Image: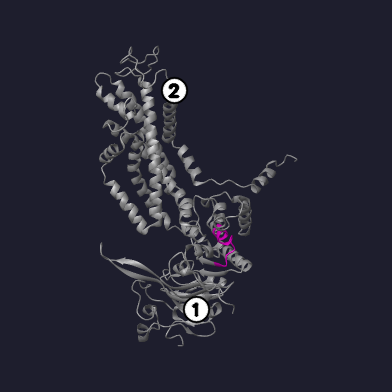
């Protein structure tokens, strides 16, 4: 394996949440991301899946240093981003971009599509003439499938899919090495989804981009990812190659997630076994002791409440955090 | 070429050319133009402003010239050029009203501009940077709010002496507080929007993001507040002049004219009614315009 582009080690992002009291409330840590480690090599896509509130988006933002990490390191080509000062960080930013979930909210309503796409260029390539910027923007608009004649249009004049294409154009114009896609297709119509995903994959192939693909849509993740990481309450449950995750999931949570994906054949859909995950996600302010998933796990035993399961190897490149994965 | 479809090449040319989008500002402008009260307000306001600026040059009498032969002349006196008569000192009332309008509008505009600049800067920085900066700036605003205006003005007068520019300063120093609070609130809601995060991910610095993304997005609310601040400032100036803290004779403003007129209400009501009519019309127009702007820029309408 080539040396990893991005190395995340024991990353923690905790938020201080105020609890009780008007004047002297105590602060409780909300562990949005709690000790994540993984590597990402060039040109690879890592899918990150999990329920709402499991820390997917927080992870993406913490890697891009849009949110401060509480502890742990995010190493980019061996250099720890969390320790950099502002100027150094800015220099690194051009290699790391993000595509957001809500296409319209991620575009400034007062700026034209052309200005939005050109913004990273204006920030990083200050030497470029305005004509050169314009040419690059037009070229990029063609690449993402927008008519270049629409440069002067405003975000509210575009459809959701077109807005997302503008967002992708903005992320890709600097030819980044890492792109965090934070649920880029969740807000889109099903008919547009495939187009946007294929567009992202085309860019990835053309520019050899590493991608963190955050989603709760397992079919989409399966289509785009090489490896998949399953998160639950800010912790890794399982991390494995795509085929291993979808074919031989080891963790009871992953198994339940995979089984919950509907099969587009009604007979098979009715016949498939069901593993129901009972109850709701526990409050991240007060996570269960031991294994965070134990309160909803069908296989939980007494050891799960006592000891936090560590990631164990369950095959080549397959890691599971469960006391009972061998069962 | 054969005349069957002459528009086809034109349509193709249109696709190749850059289509111009319609910005939110242009949309708002259209909505504003559809609002009759606001348009009427704008027209009357421009007329009054224009008359105040060039009117005094065209009149035969200047605002401080005394016509000894026509004291308290009744209007209209076309022969002498006192179209609206004179006051108790024989000064032309129309000239004085227009000149007073010049001062009042100038105070209104300059003080509002000062309030705008300070308020928007403080508000945007406090809201966007947040944390300790926010605390510090907003507590200073609270502190300033608690200083009584007249007291503040009197102290300024004592320290700097009577000065016309001081009035702008005093009024601007009071009016920016509300502006700062409004802008801060707006900025706080904008700060967590995804496009701001996107701007940071694209390498924008804090100053850059404030100027390029925050300010254009708070401008709508700011514009509305500006149109509502100008009448406030004009009234405030009248109030200060009424207390004798503002403009000094023979200079005049609408507030002073009204003050003088009120003294002669029983003998010569014209001297009150004429400047008061000008002033209230202006205030009405500004308020209509402000209302129209609010409707036009209201994001919920989009």
Q: Given the image, what chain letter belongs to the residue carrying mark 2?
A: B
Residue nearest the viewer, comparing B76 with A49: B76
Image location of residue A248, percent across then percent down = 52, 82
**B46 above or below B92?**
below
**B127 above or below A72?**
above
Q: Quadrant of residue B292?
A: top left
The CA distance from mark 1 to mark 2 is 83 Å
Residue at the location (50% across, 43% down)? B26
**B185 above or below A179?**
above
Image location of residue B93, percent across then percent down = 35, 21
Packing grade of label 1 (10 A; few <14, some 14-19, many >=20) is: many
Extent of the magenta region? A166-178
- The answer to whether tags 1 and 2 share a subunit is no
Numbered disc total? 2
Secondary structure beneath dot 1 equals: strand
Q: Can residue B100 be seen from the camera position used here?
A: yes
**Outermost residue, bottom side:** A327
Q: Nearer the viewer, mark 1 or mark 2?
A: 2
Colour theme? one colour
Q: Which residue is mark 1?
A: A239
Residue B57 bears which disc, if any?
A: 2
Label 1 with label 2: CB-CB less than 8 Å? no
Q: Quadrant of residue B246?
A: top left
Q: Given the image, what chain letter belongs to the residue carrying mark 1?
A: A
Quarter of the image that includes the N terminus of chain B = top right
Residue nearest the viewer, comparing A183 with B270: B270
Residue A290 bears which disc, if any?
A: none
Image location of residue B157, percent across then percent down = 29, 37
């Amino acid at each position: 394996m080539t040396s990893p582009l991005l190395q995340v080690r024991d990353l923690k992002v905790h938020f201080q949440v105020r609890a009780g009291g008007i004047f002297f409330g105590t602060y409780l840590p909300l562990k949005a991301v709690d000790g994540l480690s993984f590597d990402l090599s060039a040109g690879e896509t890592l899918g990150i899946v999990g329920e709402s509130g499991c820390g997917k988006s927080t992870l993406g933002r913490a890697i891009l240093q849009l949110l401060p990490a509480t502890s742990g390191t995010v190493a980019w080509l061996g250099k720890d981003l969390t320790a950099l000062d502002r100027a150094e960080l800015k220099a690194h930013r051009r290699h790391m971009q993000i595509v957001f979930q809500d296409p319209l909210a991620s575009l400034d309503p007062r700026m034209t599509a052309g200005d939005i796409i050109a913004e990273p260029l204006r920030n990083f390539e200050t030497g470029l003439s305005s004509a050169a910027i314009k040419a690059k923007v037009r070229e990029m608009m063609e690449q993402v499938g927008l008519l270049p004649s629409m440069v002067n249009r405003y975000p509210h004049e575009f459809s959701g899919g077109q807005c997302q294409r503008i967002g992708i154009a903005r992320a890709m114009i600097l030819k980044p090495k890492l792109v965090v896609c934070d649920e880029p297709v969740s807000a889109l119509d099903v008919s547009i989804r495939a187009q946007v995903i294929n567009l992202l994959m085309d860019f990835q192939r053309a520019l050899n981009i590493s991608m963190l693909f955050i989603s709760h849509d397992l079919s989409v993740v399966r289509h785009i990812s090489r490896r998949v990481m399953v998160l639950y309450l800010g912790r890794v449950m399982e991390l494995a190659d795509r085929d291993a995750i979808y074919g031989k999931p080891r963790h009871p949570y992953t198994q339940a997630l995979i089984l919950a994906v509907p099969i587009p054949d009604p007979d098979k859909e009715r016949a498939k076994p069901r593993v129901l995950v009972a109850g709701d996600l526990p409050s991240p302010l007060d996570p269960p002791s031991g294994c965070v998933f134990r309160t909803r796990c069908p296989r939980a035993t007494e050891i799960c409440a006592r000891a936090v399961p560590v990631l164990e190897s369950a095959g080549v490149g397959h890691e599971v955090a469960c006391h009972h994965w061998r069962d | 070429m054969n005349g069957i479809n002459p528009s086809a090449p034109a349509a193709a040319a249109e696709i190749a050319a850059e289509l111009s989008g319609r910005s939110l500002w242009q949309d708002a402008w259209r909505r504003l133009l559809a609002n009759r009260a606001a348009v009427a307000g704008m027209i009357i306001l421009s007329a009054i402003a224009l008359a105040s600026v060039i009117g005094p040059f065209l009149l035969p009498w200047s605002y401080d010239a005394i016509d000894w032969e026509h004291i308290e002349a009744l209007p209209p006196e076309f022969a002498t050029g006192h179209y609206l008569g004179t006051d108790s000192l024989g000064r032309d009332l129309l000239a004085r009203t227009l000149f007073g309008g010049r001062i009042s509008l100038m105070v209104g505009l300059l003080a509002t501009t000062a309030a705008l600049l300070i308020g928007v800067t403080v508000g945007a920085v406090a809201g966007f940077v947040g944390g300790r900066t926010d605390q510090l700036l907003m507590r200073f605003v609270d502190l300033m709010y608690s200083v009584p205006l007249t007291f503040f003005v009197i102290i300024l007068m004592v320290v700097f002496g009577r000065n016309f520019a001081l009035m702008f300063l005093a009024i601007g120093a009071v009016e920016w507080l509300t502006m700062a609070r409004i802008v801060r609130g707006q900025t706080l809601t904008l700060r967590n929007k995804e496009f701001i995060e996107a701007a940071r991910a694209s390498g924008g610095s804090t100053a850059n993001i404030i100027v390029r993304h925050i300010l254009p997005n708070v401008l709508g609310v700011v514009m509305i507040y500006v149109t509502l601040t100008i009448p406030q400032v004009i009234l405030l100036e009248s109030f200060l002049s009424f207390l004798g803290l503002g403009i000094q004779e023979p200079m005049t403003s609408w507030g002073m004219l009204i003050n003088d007129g009120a003294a002669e209400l029983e003998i010569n009501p014209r001297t009150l009614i004429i400047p008061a009519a000008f002033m209230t019309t202006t205030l009405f127009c500004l308020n209509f315009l402000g209302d129209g702007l609010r409707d036009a820029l209201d994001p919920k309408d989009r």
